[in-house]
Amino acid sequence: MNDKSLAGKTLVVDADGTLLATDMLVECFWAALGKQPVACLFVVARSFTKPAILKQRLAALAGLNVGLLPRRPEVVAFIEQARRQGRHVIVASGSDQGLVKILSEAVGLGNDSMASDGQINLTSTRKAAALEKRFGKAGFDYIGDSRADIAVWKSADKAIVVAPSRRLTKSLATLGKPVEIIGKPMRWADLLRAFRPHQWVKNVLLFLPLLAAHRTDLTGLLLVLWGIAAFSAAASSIYIVNDLLDLEADRLHETKHRRPFASGAVSLMTGMFAGFCLGAFALLTAGLHSWQLAAIIAVYMALSLSYSLILKRLRWVDVAVLAALYTLRVVAGSIAAGVAMSGWLAAFIFPIFLALGCVKRLVELGKAKDDNRLPGRGYARTDRGDLLNIGITAAVGALIVYGLYTYSSIALTLYSHPWELRLAGVAVAFWLMRMIRRGWQGKMDYDPIVFALRDPLGLAFIATGGILLFNAAGVI
């Protein structure tokens, strides 16, 4: 069909999953949940069976920045080509009309759009009827992406489909009209990236109680690995929740905007399903070990969720919660291996993790470009000095606890060379000094734990301390 014959045929473009690589209803839910969690859940409970009202009320709560939502470049290019051909292009979406109008104007299509209005949910057969009434049977071409669009494609002259699934592709074969496919489906590698598997390395902390008790038996190691598998799944489920709650902040960030959900590489619904499955797997796996391990993971997940919704915005409280979350990993290792948790170990590791939490915020503030508060956080660059002081105080506190431990009856029983045990504390001190200094300078990754496990000099300090500890225990 030439450009002249196309000029009189309207091109209708769906928004969610088509023009946008996301869904505005789901975006509104997570944005509202992050800003007003109680009000959001109340609206969902009250209006769940009334989609048009639900969309309108969630949009009002969310204050969604439509301009930041990821668009599919192939659909934007298709629209631009249609406009060069002189075609009339409009957006017709099941999302709330207020958001759709903003989107339409943002892509240069003006405010001529069709959407749900709080009374009519403009999807599937309702959308097909509305478009057919306005443009006539087969008087328009339609770009969509889901099974809900099949009714619209039946009324359209031509079906343009974005990244269809195999099931949808089979259904399209029965339309009996021209079908054009554009775009590519989600890559599973992007979904795996959303799990942040590189963060699983943090769960080596579960080995600490086993090592502190000088146990190296295969049974203990396997039980800890069991706990690590459960904790890794739990952590990944929370990472997904964090990303869904931080969508706007991530899109404003210089590097985090590339994350799978923020960039639109993975749909939010897919993320929600994956997060639920990971959380269920974590609790089930832990429950097969013991109710105590399942309880610790449940506490970890609940505290992490509270952190994501509220606590991360509270200055000073958030670094304490981060320290508690890391400490729970060590407690989980104690339960998994069946080793009693030493009070000395707990008193030593919590201030260390508190110091590392301060380092994490120092790094973020060191990379900040202005004096505004970090997106989604309660800190600004003016807080760097206080964070440094807290970090140093926590590190000194940890070293004092360690020093006192080396003179305790427990240490004198476990270690045959106490002076080497004390010398290992010097390596720990140098490592902590390096971490705090690098954090102050902003010369590390955003996560200090991951940085610590990749930093050659830091690993040398840790290795030196480890050798001294093993030698003090008479192992080598």
Image (tube, helix red, strand yellow):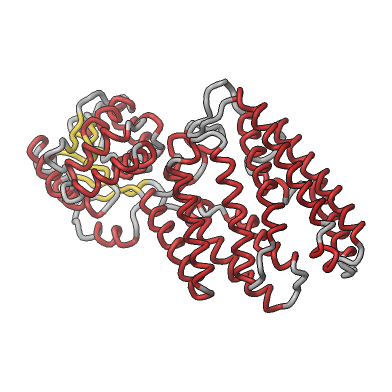
How far across and down, in percent of the image, does residue 253 sit?
53, 33
How far across and down, in percent of the image, does residue 150 sit?
20, 53
The answer to which image quadrant residue 92 occupies is: top left
- Residue sticking out furthest to the front: 409
Quarter of the image with the C terminus is: bottom right
Residue occupying the point 30% across, 49% down: 145
How far across and down, in percent of the image, does residue 339 sit?
66, 71
Is residue 380 found left or right of 135 in the rendered image? right
Residue occupying the point 76% across, 41% down: 396
Residue occupying the point 56% across, 60% down: 232
Q: Which of 247 and 363 is in front in this view?
A: 363
How far across and down, in percent of the image, does residue 42 sit?
25, 45
Quarter of the image with the N terminus is: top left
Q: Is residue 193 above or below residue 253?
A: below
Q: Which of 285 and 265 is in front in this view?
A: 285
- Residue sticking out furthest to the top: 371
Do we see residue 446 in this rendering?
yes
Q: Which of 64 and 36 is in front in this view?
A: 36
How many labels sit on residues? 0
Residue occupying the point 57% across, 26% down: 380
Q: Which of 154 and 24 is in front in this view?
A: 24
Do we see residue 198 in this rendering?
no
Is residue 432 found left or right of 384 in the rendered image? right
Q: In this view, does 285 lie above or below 358?
A: below
Is residue 248 found left or right of 59 in the rendered image? right
The answer to which image quadrant residue 57 occupies is: top left
Q: In this view, does 273 lie above or below 74?
A: below
